[in-house]
Image (cartoon, rainbow, N blue to C red):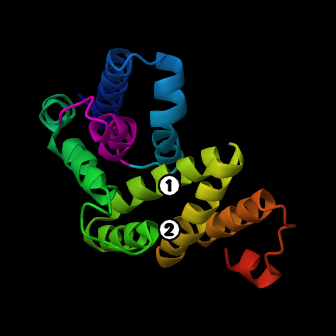
Amino acid sequence: MCIVEEICVLIVTAREIAQIAARSGGADVDDSVHAVDSGAAVHLAEWNAGEALQAAGLLHGFVQRGQLEPHFVAAHCGARVADLCVRYQKLRSDPVASGWSGNPLILQRIRSYIAAYEDPELAFLCIADLLHRVRTGLEGDARHRRTAIDEGRLVLAPLLEMLGMFALRVELEEQLMVAEGRAPQIDEAARQAS
């Protein structure tokens, strides 16, 4: 089997597992898989991420919610996919349970920075998921918009900056300003740097 067929098989397998997990969770497959859990996978595919990373983009939410066990993911999609899902679950774990008493978004930013240094693929999974969550939140009601704006400013924007993803950071800043009802005023130097 050639490498392209192997990639396709892994991603198809991940999609099938995601659909089964969505059905077992009682959710409408189209809404659950395509709208929620595939959001990160769509970004990863657009960025030409590797097959394991795209598969993790499809499955991490199901692992995080306990709908899929990591050993099941490893058996069907490989140890790397399961590892990315588990590590991302830990990255997103409850800050209060860890003893953190500060702003939980700051802890999420710190964890994301560490993840970026340890494993670039984990950082890209984090960015893809955050980007999807922020963009989805900006389309919601006032409470969801406020949460998305805070997460975008305090976690995603600094992570994009750290990784040199300036074009995406500028685009995010413009989206956050519009969500706040302000006219985007990104200076021309920042736009050209991206």
Q: Which residue type does callout 2 highlight?
A: Val
Q: Could you tell me what secondary structure mostly forms the magenta stretch?
A: helix
Picture residue at 25% right of the left edge, 34% below the top: 66
Quadrant assignment, res 6: top left
Q: Could you say where residue 58 lies in the image, as x and y percent from the top left?
A: 39, 36
Q: Could you say where residue 176 lies in the image, as x and y percent from the top left?
A: 71, 62
Q: Are marks 1 and 2 in contact (CB under 8 Å)?
A: yes
Residue 56 in the magenta stretch? The answer is yes
Looking at the image, tell me whether mark 1 or mark 2 is earlier in sequence order.
Answer: 1
Q: Quadrant of the C terminus?
A: bottom right
Disc number placed over residue 155 in the picture, else none: 2
Q: Is residue 168 above or below residue 51?
A: below
- Left or right of 129: which side holds 118? left
Q: Could you say where residue 156 lies in the image, as x and y percent from the top left?
A: 52, 65
Picture residue at 27% right of the left edge, 46% below the top: 85
Disc number placed over residue 130 in the picture, else none: 1
Give the residues drawn in magenta, as a range. 50-69
Helix, strand or loop for disc 1 = helix
Q: Which residue type does callout 1 highlight?
A: Leu
Of 67 and 118, the residue lying toward us? 67
Of 122 and 36, the residue lying toward us? 36
Q: Quadrant of the N terminus?
A: top left
Helix, strand or loop for disc 2 = helix
Residue 12 in the magenta stretch? The answer is no
- Left or right of 51: which side holds 86? left
Q: CA distance from mark 1 to mark 2?
A: 8 Å
Q: Could you say where residue 97 lies in the image, as x and y percent from the top left?
A: 25, 60
Quadrant assignment, res 4: top left
